[in-house]
Amino acid sequence: MMVRKDFPIFNIKVRGKPLVYLDSAATTQKPQVVMDTLNKYYSSQNSNVHRGVHYLSELATKEYEAAREKVQKFIHAKDSREIIFTRGTTESINLVAQTFGRERVQEGDEVLITHMEHHSNIVPWQILCSEKKAHLKIAPINQKGELLIDEFKKLVNPKTKIVGIAHVSNALGTINPIKEIVSFCHDHGVPVLVDGAQAASHLKVDVEALDCDFYTLSGHKIYGPTGIGVLYGKLKHLEKMPPYQGGGDMIKSVTFEKTIYNDVPFKFEAGTPNIAGAIGLGSALDYLSALNMEKVQKYEEELLKYMEEQLLTLPKIKLIGRAEKKAALQSFIVENIHPHDVGTILDQEGVAVRTGHHCAQPVMNFYGVPATVRASLGIYNTKEDISLLVLALKKVFEVLG
Ligand code: C6P
């Protein structure tokens, strides 16, 4: 896509070389328009929301609520009240575990997740299960990094109270068949939370079509600012759920005897929210929508295919994560060279990749590796970036091979 010019970061040099940024799964770079929006907000709109009758407060509130509607449209939610602003996916999942989960899961019950989850979709459920004396069940994956769907289905039973599953795995790139999973789970009366942190910037997300109960995303992974994220929840759930945190803005009235909570979504947005972040996220979504998510998906699919082919031309490289349906990233290891050493030499060449366990240690354990190198793509990457990755990897073989 011809969008590189929109991202000022590509004007910098890294160690005297042009930046080859292959770490968008950790966080994406930001287009100028998002930074301009933040600047405009702080320069001419800054005020607190829902709290003042004055001009600026009304303006900030209008912009903040407009951002909520942009998120609603972007993920095709029915109602903007189904969009809650959080700090990111991690907070969104914790919110659901500590409210919906806490009420629903009781002693002896089960929470079902998969072997490919990010720690953010494991630990909140572990905390809940330990508090409730419930059990965390894990659906297995195969060597390609795909969910074993029949095994998953066998694990759904009357004790299963909630399912948490990644739309796209951050360590393997696997795209899970969410629609099929949600439909199966609903047939068995089980609600599903979808961790969309790695999906929303690559795929066209339609929460109504997926029919999931909850969907989460992180602003910083979708070309928006850090510190802002989204929890989508079906209105019927959100209205029944208790609040997550108490404080300002989430109440209708407070006396020392009794507090009446505000309506959804404000009930879940205690305290002054990340107003600038939400508005910045709104502008990132406008930017992506103008590019057209179907075109983004197609472009990235071609680029990913090219990256896989190019990596396979190199000796000593083992690709990890070979699912039929994948999004925008490739994990790999280089025989006899630790991923951190690979990453360090790539960095010398201006190539940014992530090395480590990617906050998905169970995935590393499954493959029996301590870490992988992960090259992840965004809309600004080109075939040229991949050629430079390949050249830098050849350098790794020269130096350490
Ligand atoms: N993965 C990565 O490099 P936060 O940190 O709350 O924005 O997102 C957490 C998270 C949840 N689920 C998935 C599938 C994720 O990939 C992430 C974040 C980054 O892979 C940073 S660890």
Image (cartoon, grey):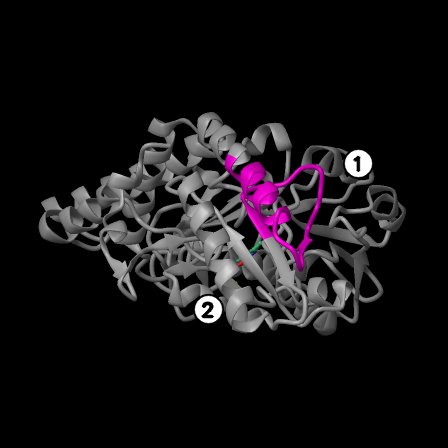
Residue behind mark 2:
345
**The residue at label 2 has a CB less than 8 Å from ligand 1:** no
Quarter occupied by the C terminus: bottom right
When asked about the image quadrant of residue 3, the answer is top left
N-terminal label among 1 and 2 = 1
In percent of width and height, residue 29 lies at: 34, 51
Q: Which mark identifies residue 184?
A: 1
Q: Nearer the viewer, mark 1 or mark 2?
A: 2
Q: Answer few, some or many: residues within 10 Å of disc 1's Cα (few below 14, many 20 plus, some between 14 and 19).
A: some
Q: Residue 156 carries which label?
A: none
Give the residue drawn at x 63%, y 57%: 332
Q: Where is residue 93 in the image (x, y as percent from the top left)?
A: 57, 57
Give the magenta-colored segment's residue range: 303-330
Q: What x and y, as percent, mark residue 31? A: 28, 44
Which residue, as the protein is rendered here, is positioned at the far front? Answer: 398
Residue 130 placement, left or right of 305: right
- Going by the numbered disc 2, the residue's amino acid type is Ile
Q: Is residue 311 magenta?
A: yes
Q: Are marks 1 and 2 in contact (CB under 8 Å)?
A: no
154 horizontally vs 122: left or right: right
The residue under the point 26% across, 59% down is 13
- Residue 53 seen anywhere in this rendered image of the structure: no
Q: Circle 1 — which element?
A: helix
Mark 1: which amino acid?
A: Phe
Please give the name of the residue rendered at 79% of the width and 52% of the height, measured from the top-left corner.
143
- In the picture shown, does residue 302 fall above or below 32? above
Q: Position of residue 33 (x, y in %)?
A: 23, 41
Q: Give the alpha-carbon distance from disc 1 to disc 2, as whole Å.
A: 46 Å
The residue sitting at 50% across, 39% down in the picture is: 202
